[in-house]
Amino acid sequence: MIKAIVNADKKFPILLRTVPQSPKILYYQGPLFDRLNEPTALTVAIVGSRRATRYGLDMAYEIALELSKYGIIIVSGLAEGIDAAAHKGALDGGSGTVAVLGCGLDVYYPYANKALQERIGREGVLLSEFPSGARPQGKHFPSRNRIISGLSTGVLVVEGAERSGTLITADTALSQGRDVYALPGPAGSRNTKTPHKLLRAGACLVETARDILDELGLPAHTNLSEKNKGIPSKNTPQLSADETAVLSTVVNMPKTIDKIIYETGLQCDKVSSILVLLEIQKYITRSLEGEYVSLSKQTEDLW
Amino acid sequence: MIARILSASLFGIDAMPVDVEAHVSSGLPNFSIVGLPDAAIRESRERVKAGILNAEFEFPKRRIIVNLAPADVKKEGPAFDLPIAIGVLATTRQMSIRRPGRYAIVGELALDGSIRRVAGALAFAILVREQKLDGLIVPRENAAEAALVSGVKVIPVANLYECVSFLSCEAEIMPYVPDKSPTSRFPENVQRDIAEVRGQHAARRALEIAAAGGHNLLMFGPPGSGKTMMAEAFAGLLPGLSLEEAIETTRIYSAARTFEATTALVVTRPFRSPHHTISDIGLIGGGAIPRPGEISLSHNGVLFLDEVNEFQKHVLEVLRQPLENGCVTISRAAGVISYPSDFVLLAAMNPCPCGYLGDPVVDCACTPQEIRRYRARISGPLRDRIDMHVEVARVSRDQLTSDLAGESSITVRHRVAKARACQKKRFAGTNINVNARMKNRHLAQFCPMDVKTKDFLGQAVDRLAMSARSYSKITSIARTIADLTGEADICTNHIAEALQYRSLDREIRIV
Ligand SMILES: Nc1ncnc2c1ncn2[C@@H]1O[C@H](COP(=O)(O)OP(=O)(O)O)[C@@H](O)[C@H]1O
Ligand SMILES: [Mg+2]
Ligand SMILES: [Zn+2]
């Protein structure tokens, strides 16, 4: 059920109430809302590119998961890509998540995240300053971004291209006095432009959830697990030599089919059919760029 | 006295017989032409007058009526000038037709009495053969074209005086004999060799499959990725035209008045690339005087729609019938005209609204949602008739200079020809000639799969969340892939590769 709360209400999230141009009214749905004002509640936003890489998705998921296991609430914008990975990690970690929408809470946008939106409505909280039925509009998103950073003590930027919305969110966060963390990426990748720009400007470098916990002054936690790397171990023995060769080319970097043909030296028709076989077995997927990306268990359904 | 001359008019790409009757009587001097003449024939009156005078004959100051029969068919074109002039001269007894046998006459008169080339000479020659006439008198420039039809005596004339001398038996004119008898197959379209395209292994493979099976293909990739270049090379992957194909294509070009400057016959496989501002008449044909459109000019060849998303929706909708049937019908008051239009459709578009998705240098600013919506915008009827989709990434500059040249068109064409021969054998006795044209009943008959392969296809369509209509497309592409290596049975590898070329089926579902 969608509820509304005005700025003056004492249950209105405190962090958000104190930022410039704090929203006058918030619509919300989900059990987590009341926890936002508990004295022990800690919120961290994770934002990034909608067209993310496997590396970005895995890291967003992983860090969200670990922070969530530690009891930290993850805030994000329910966009495709990094946002979705962060929400998913947060839900899996058990502390729930806040999704701030740029449309009415009963509007599924983007439609690809419908199931995730419904899950957050049940296990976390959906927030919006726009009433039911409001369609998403371009101008809603900068305004939504100020709520994401406003609700959080710090903002982690995972991936973002040169002139991305992510960069704007980071700027807003700084102007609201929030900490900005950034995850470094491979040099030369379009998606590392924003985080590296922030790092150069003095953002806090984050490699693991531990780095953020340290920044927040939280003691070491025994429960933090190693992130998984490399070829997913499921079923790997079943793959033929050629299949393994093809798969190994895309483990660390998304590649076009031509690059894969070049690197493996296999014939085009062979590579084509192997790629489809691997895709059917969910080892890899094809991104909108037309590149092949290897999948990890946690983030495979975010593509 | 009435003079009766045989002539012909174009209807679609076919010729119809027309009788030109000239009658002179006393009365106020007048020269009229009846039989639903169009504007061109009214102008013909002036040319006939000037032509007769300049050939040193008289234009009699009497009452002359010319009738073009049958009267209820709308005729077109200046090809009646010559038969009208002959009719006028004969009926006024300035000449007498002594030449034995029945000749059809066509030709446009210039003011000085010389004769200019006309549209449709090939079709006229075919008519002459069908009607068992004794010969065809044509403008000299049309002689080679008309002589392609074997067994027709073609008399070339350069001016009105020559024509009169021939008909009155005052002079002989040798029937036109072609320099060399036409070959059974003509050279390929070589405007661009596929070897010029660097990298792009996957796209080149897709072009080969499309050429082999006659599959329509959509390429999407950023500007400068070589889409136009590859489309231009595509026609050269197809074998050269056969004589029958060349004649058919020539009739279309002749009816469209698109003469190739020097040759009578259109001998290279057509590659047409209309701009996206084209009207639907320009694309499918029609108009007040009906002409074949771009889709018919592409007959037996390639129609390339660059920036396919920029074409008007209704213009693309009209492609549905020709893509389905290989011909287009246009309704006229005088009847239904049908033009052949059996072509391979190549389409190209940007990968996203801004155009830079996947570009190694320029960042794309589009959201996933925008990208999917953009791709889904290709109108449904057209999308349903496009068999293959292929992404074309931009090749980096150093790859352009360092990558070894790939296979040349000849090598690829060789495999394509083999695959086409397989199909010819398979489809003997049916009304189709390539895999792309298979209907469900053909798929059942010609693409049997063992249980394992069938299961794999089902599982794949399911896992990749493709729509049910993908089945038949995937099967026909797999058939072509197997034909390229001469394999009788479709197996899972063929299916797997075919799945590669249906990427839009997966994206459209999530819009
Ligand atoms: N793969 C390639 N191999 C060789 N030249 C290329 C390739 N891709 C692009 N080019 C060069 O770039 C030019 C532009 O390519 P074009 O076919 O017009 O691209 P598009 O139609 O995709 O915009 C070509 O004329 C060619 O010189
Ligand atoms: Mg182009
Ligand atoms: Zn774009």
Image (cartoon, rainbow, N blue to C red):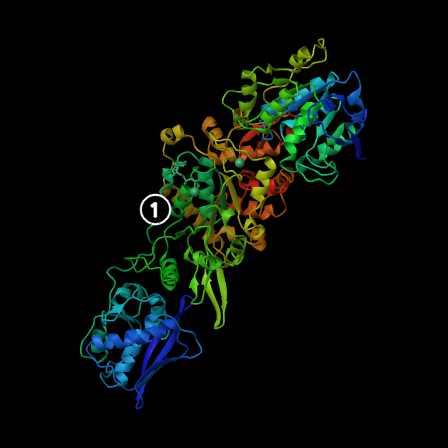
**Residue identifier under label 1:** B191
Residue B153 in picture, x, y percent from top left:
28, 71
Q: Nearer the viewer, residue A299 or B471?
A: A299
Could you tell me if residue B134 is visible in this image?
A: no
Is residue B461 found left or right of B126 in the rendered image? Answer: right
Q: Is residue A273 above or below residue B145?
A: above
Quadrant where the C terminus of chain B is found in the figure: top right
Quadrant where the N terminus of chain B is found in the figure: bottom left
Q: Residue at x 42, y 55 (%)?
A: B298
Q: Amino acid at mark 1?
A: Gln
Residue B174 in picture, x, y percent from top left:
21, 70
**Mark 1 belongs to chain:** B
Residue A75 in picture, x, y percent from top left:
70, 24
Q: Is residue B409 above or below residue A144?
A: below
Is residue A254 found left or right of B187 in the rendered image? Answer: right
Q: Is residue A30 above or below residue B183?
A: above
User: Residue A18 sits in which quadrant?
Assistant: top right
Mark 1 crowdedness (10 Å alpha carbons): few <14, some 14-19, many ≥20:
few
Residue B168 in picture, x, y percent from top left:
22, 80
Helix or strand or loop: what does disc 1 sit on? Answer: loop
Q: Residue at x 28, y 87 (%)?
A: B62
> Where in the image, quadrant-wise, is ligand 2 located?
top left
- Count the marks: how many? 1
Is residue B277 found left or right of B462 in the rendered image? Answer: left
Is residue A39 found left or right of B484 in the rendered image? Answer: right
